[in-house]
Image: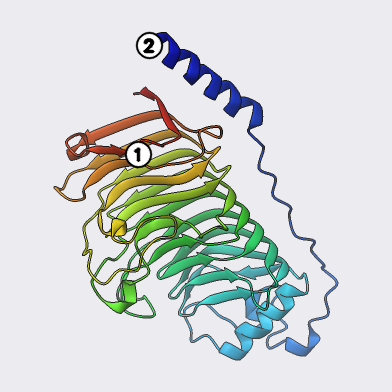
């Protein structure tokens, strides 16, 4: 029996190595010749700098001026946001060939990249460090790259005076890359504001699951509910660190795609479900509170497209929590370190 298991595991390993695809992100096409004269408010700033068009850090943000900036970005003009706080949200809707550079920018609201009228947003490049105080939401959009993104909570500067609502990569999203993604102190109160925040990072979408998500470094700390919920195909996460989860309420929550109703209330540090041909190189789960139900939840998937966790470490209370695995799971954990 042991020999059969070893042979089966070897076959799965070879299958994964042979079929693993690289994740290629297509960068936007920039156009430095976009005519911006109609939108200039202060000509002392260089072309593409938001201050040229009336948007300044640490000041009231005009919705009209912001729309002008996003219009220019959608024409292919690279846009630069200087360091500071902007009490606004940014929504990229059915946009293409957009380049935004953030110089340690803090958004009081959220950042969305979404489709509209069956038209996807695509070929979007976000460089620099972007700090979001509400949520990051991506839907039916593709070929998106981020440098360093931080979701954190500041109930004074947050536009809604609430904790952040984490990151949701939703249905139809493909080819998305983060250099680093850090999510701290995601909320979990039993209010309507957090109804759709079942996990600090939730990657899901019924029958149209996200594909080709690459994250070099993922850190989730003090999640109000589940820390990471991962579904989809061909994801690669090199380093995952989860520290504390399940600190909020499991009441008044909307469900997660591909999960049975009610399962979203059973908080886990990491929950992998219907995740095929994916790989996590290293996973560290640490819990110092007696919270959450599972340290690790390994749900079903396609057996011929296995998902691997190459290295895992459980610390403190996380060691005491159970690991739940479905009989039809396709997830293999290779080493403990």
| Residue at the left extreme, as displayed | 290
| Residue at the top extreme, as displayed | 3
> Residue beneath label 2, please?
2
| Residue lying at 13% horizontally and 47% vertically, measured from the top left | 290
Give the x, y percent position of residue 146.
Answer: 58, 55
The image shows residue 78, relative to residue 147, as above or below, that is below
Give the x, y percent position of residue 66.
Answer: 61, 83
Mark 2 and mark 1: span between their CA atoms? 20 Å
| Residue lying at 52% horizontally and 70% vertically, measured from the top left | 111
Quadrant containing the N terminus is: top left
The one of 314 and 251 positioned closer to us in this rendering? 251
Give the x, y percent position of residue 273.
Answer: 42, 46
The one of 129 and 286 positioned closer to us in this rendering? 286
User: Badge 1, how many Cα within 10 Å: few under 14, some, many 20+?
Assistant: few
Looking at marks 2 and 1 on the same chain, the residue that comes earlier in the sequence is marked by 2
Q: In this view of the protein, can residue 47 be seen by the observer?
A: no
| Residue lying at 44% horizontally and 13% vertically, measured from the top left | 4
Examine the image and state in which quarter residue 197 appears.
bottom left
Give the x, y percent position of residue 185.
Answer: 30, 60
Q: Provide the secondary structure element on which disc 2 rests.
A: helix
The image shows residue 290, relative to residue 72, as above or below, that is above
Question: Looking at the image, how many numbered discs can be counted on the residues?
Answer: 2
Quadrant containing the C terminus is: top left
Q: Provide the secondary structure element on which disc 1 rests.
A: loop
Q: Which of the labelled discs sits on residue 326, or is there none?
A: 1
| Residue at the right extreme, as displayed | 33
Seen in the image, is 5 located left or right of residue 95?
A: left
| Residue lying at 35% horizontally and 57% vertically, measured from the top left | 260
């Amino acid at each position: 029996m042991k020999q059969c298991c070893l042979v089966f595991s070897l076959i799965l390993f070879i299958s994964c190595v042979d079929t693993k695809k690289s994740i290629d992100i297509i960068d936007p096409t920039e156009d430095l010749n976009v005519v911006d004269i109609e939108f200039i408010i202060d000509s002392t700033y260089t072309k593409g700098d938001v201050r040229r068009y009336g948007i300044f850090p640490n000041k009231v943000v005009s919705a009209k001026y912001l729309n002008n900036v996003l219009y220019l970005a959608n024409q292919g003009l690279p846009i630069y946001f200087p360091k500071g706080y902007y009490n606004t949200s940014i929504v990229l809707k059915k946009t293409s060939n957009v380049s935004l550079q953030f110089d340690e920018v803090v958004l009081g609201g959220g950042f969305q990249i979404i489709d509209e009228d069956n038209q996807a947003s695509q070929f979007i490049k976000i460089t620099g460090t972007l700090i979001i105080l509400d949520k990051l939401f991506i839907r039916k959009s593709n070929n998106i790259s981020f440098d360093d993104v931080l979701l954190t909570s500041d109930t004074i500067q947050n536009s809604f005076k609430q904790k952040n609502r984490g990151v949701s990569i939703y249905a139809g999203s493909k080819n998305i890359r983060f250099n680093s993604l850090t999510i701290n102190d995601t909320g979990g109160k039993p209010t309507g504001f957090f109804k759709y925040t079942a996990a600090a990072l939730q990657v899901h979408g019924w029958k149209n699951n996200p594909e080709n998500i690459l994250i070099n470094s993922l850190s989730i700390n003090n999640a109000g509910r589940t820390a990471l919920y991962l579904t989809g195909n061909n994801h690669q996460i090199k380093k995952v660190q989860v520290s504390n989860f399940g600190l909020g309420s499991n009441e008044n929550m909307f469900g997660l795609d591909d999960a049975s109703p009610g399962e979203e209330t059973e908080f886990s540090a990491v929950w992998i479900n219907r995740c095929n041909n994916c790989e996590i190189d290293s996973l560290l789960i640490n819990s110092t509170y007696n919270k959450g139900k599972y340290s690790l939840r390994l749900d079903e998937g396609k057996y011929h497209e296995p998902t691997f966790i190459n290295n895992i470490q459980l610390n403190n209370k996380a060691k005491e929590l159970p690991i739940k695995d479905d009989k039809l799971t396709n997830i293999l954990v290779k080493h403990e370190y």
